[in-house]
Amino acid sequence: MKKVHVELGQRSYDILIAPHLLGQAPELFRKHGIGSRMFLVANTTVFQLYGQPLVERLRGSGFRVTEIFIPDGEKFKNLHTVENIYTYLIAQRADRSSTIAALGGGVTGDIAGFVAATFLRGIPYLQIPTTVLSQVDSSVGGKTGVNHPHGKNMIGVFYQPSLVCVDTDTLNTLNEREYRSGLYEVLKYGLIYDESFFDYLLEHLDGLLERRSEVLEPVIGRCCEIKAEVTTIDEKEAGLRRILNFGHTFGHALEVVAGFQGITHGEAVGYGMLAANRLSLRLGLLGEREVQRIHDAILRLGPLPNVDHLAVDRLLEAMERDKKRQDDQKVFVLLKDIGTTEMQSNIDDKTISEIWKEVLPLPQA
Amino acid sequence: MKKVHVELGQRSYDILIAPHLLGQAPELFRKHGIGSRMFLVANTTVFQLYGQPLVERLRGSGFRVTEIFIPDGEKFKNLHTVENIYTYLIAQRADRSSTIAALGGGVTGDIAGFVAATFLRGIPYLQIPTTVLSQVDSSVGGKTGVNHPHGKNMIGVFYQPSLVCVDTDTLNTLNEREYRSGLYEVLKYGLIYDESFFDYLLEHLDGLLERRSEVLEPVIGRCCEIKAEVTTIDEKEAGLRRILNFGHTFGHALEVVAGFQGITHGEAVGYGMLAANRLSLRLGLLGEREVQRIHDAILRLGPLPNVDHLAVDRLLEAMERDKKRQDDQKVFVLLKDIGTTEMQSNIDDKTISEIWKEVLPLPQA
């Protein structure tokens, strides 16, 4: 078992990563101080796969578990779902010692984490992420929240869990596209922070694509470590944490213009990294050889979906509105080497437009 | 000007207390790092009294201020009002550098603080409390939140402001009952924490009731100091902070059974302190002489409204449901001296019932 300790003073917590981790859930929860009264939030698909056996195991060990089912999908990540959970918690007499456990992907974690953060001004929160993206990204760093009809993730708070349990076996039931989508974020960690991890990923790519436990545990573990390091230094996104947005300024625009249809978040980040890579070349930060290496690595995780129908003008508009702007400037995270980032703002629209045209349409690998 | 520094590491902030403080608002805000883009949340009553001149003064000094009006009253302290504010903030392009300013009483602060805490995962928050209760209680300690149809303050987070500006002149427009209601909480601070402050209050009670600036500044200041001390030691209500609930276990039941009609929060706390005082006597913690002194002091802030029509059985039921219970035990904050508290749980219903009967009906002072 790999263990990553996230040091945040009184709000410190551990991330445990291993295959078949849920089989030891009762002992692990107790060892990490999780109380016996638990509300398990999941959608019915994930619940049938992993929730039912987990609940039975916990109940058999003296935990008192109540299931809270939420509808599946980003469109239900809103205040309405949150209110329904509050109402249920009150009806079931949840109190400050009750734990909210999120079993599922990023949407489940974002919703359940926001509820845990805001119910009775914060109750204990346990994360059991079951997708690549949630295991390496959304379950570390404390971001919780929901969408507003006029904007994604507009409502939320930073709130740290008491424990994160990553069972890499849960990745086995993801469909191929969802699984590969998560790997773009995995690759991102190598690109922005750790060249030797980037090399490791390329060397073990076959094992990673085949979801072998002996590759998944160290890979997911290293991603969590990097994200924990970055978000510990910069808990509230004032500085360093921005490097995690590598590929996201471009990628988010793709998602918005596509109406979050036909492209996954990970794939959008894949495109976004291709674009940020080209921009790094254009600005003279990276040499041709490195750019090609990065480009090839991203494409090896593919295929990326066809997005040729998206107009570059609309992508530029979407970037303009991007809430991640700072002082009305778009800040781009670029690479000056594999493993090393540099921030640049004041990139003119003409350049961005040309970068988009270089990336779209994409020559398929 | 009195200044209370609340030391909470990176989340430290100052509370400024003085008459006519709002006259210097632009300079004070700048000096304390408040940004120039501001959303001022107030109800129309308070806005007409203090908001309009404040906004004009700020605009004249280069601040860009947008007013957000909320309906007046506790019944609007809910997620619906919060959602309306989110929508407005997004429409007005508020960003992470915008400040939410709350001008008004506790309800305004609770709502605006919750919005500031949860919009874009937290944006700067400035408090300008205009009632006794909000100046000495709700504006210090970081509690924010709204009610759920099934329970008061069920939804919320701890979130610290960037600055608290207490202009004691704003108390002059409170009606007599509202003003006196706040004084019960003022007296509470002496009772639970500082005997010499209790003595000072009794010595200067005439000046306090006449709202003289030279009494208000040190009195409000000392209350803020005590609340800041207590909540700094125990930010998340794990231990010491409970002493602030003195009078509240009994008082909250009164409010609930009265349906929050005909009795103010402060008056309920007044009754609650009378009851906690009697219970302290009953358990042998306080002597007859001290109990009488405390009793008389509370009554001097009166008159308390008649609540004889409330049935003791229903008060007991309400206490049973009180969310402030710990491990299904009611915890009572009692006095073992003026300025010194003691916690006790396991008090049987018969005793509580007798205490209620001793306190209600109340021989008017």
Image (tube, coloured by chain):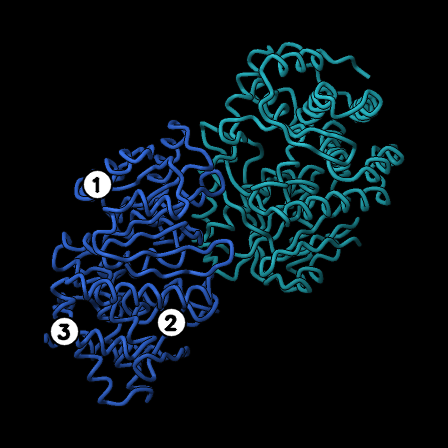
Chain colours: A blue, B cyan
In space, the residues marked 1 and 2 are separated at their CA atoms by 34 Å
How many other residues sit within 10 Å of disc 3, few (<14), some (14-19) or many (≥20)?
A: some
Circle 2 sits on which residue?
A243
Image point 37% across, 64% down: which residue?
A322
Q: Toward the viewer: A196 or B304?
A: A196
Image quarter in which the N terminus of chain B is found: bottom right
Q: Amino acid at mark 1?
A: Phe
In space, the residues marked 1 and 3 are separated at their CA atoms by 32 Å
Q: Amino acid at mark 2?
A: Ile
Image quarter in which the C terminus of chain B is found: top right
Q: Toward the viewer: B192 or A121?
A: B192
Q: Are marks 1 and 2 in contact (CB under 8 Å)?
A: no
Circle 2 marks a residue in which chain?
A: A
Local secondary structure at mark 1: helix
Q: Quadrant of residue B319?
A: top right
As drawn, the label of residue A300 is 3
Image point 66% across, 26% down: which residue?
B264
Image point 62% across, 37% down: which residue?
B242
- Is A167 on the left-hand or right-hand side of B133? left
As drawn, the label of residue B212 is none
State whether residue B138 is above or below residue B322. below
How many other residues sit within 10 Å of disc 2, few (<14), some (14-19) or many (≥20)?
A: many
Q: Position of residue A76 (x, y in %)?
A: 28, 44
Q: Position of residue B299 (x, y in %)?
A: 79, 22
- Is B336 on the left-hand or right-hand side of B40? right
Q: Are marks 1 and 2 on the same chain?
A: yes
As drawn, the label of residue A47 is 1
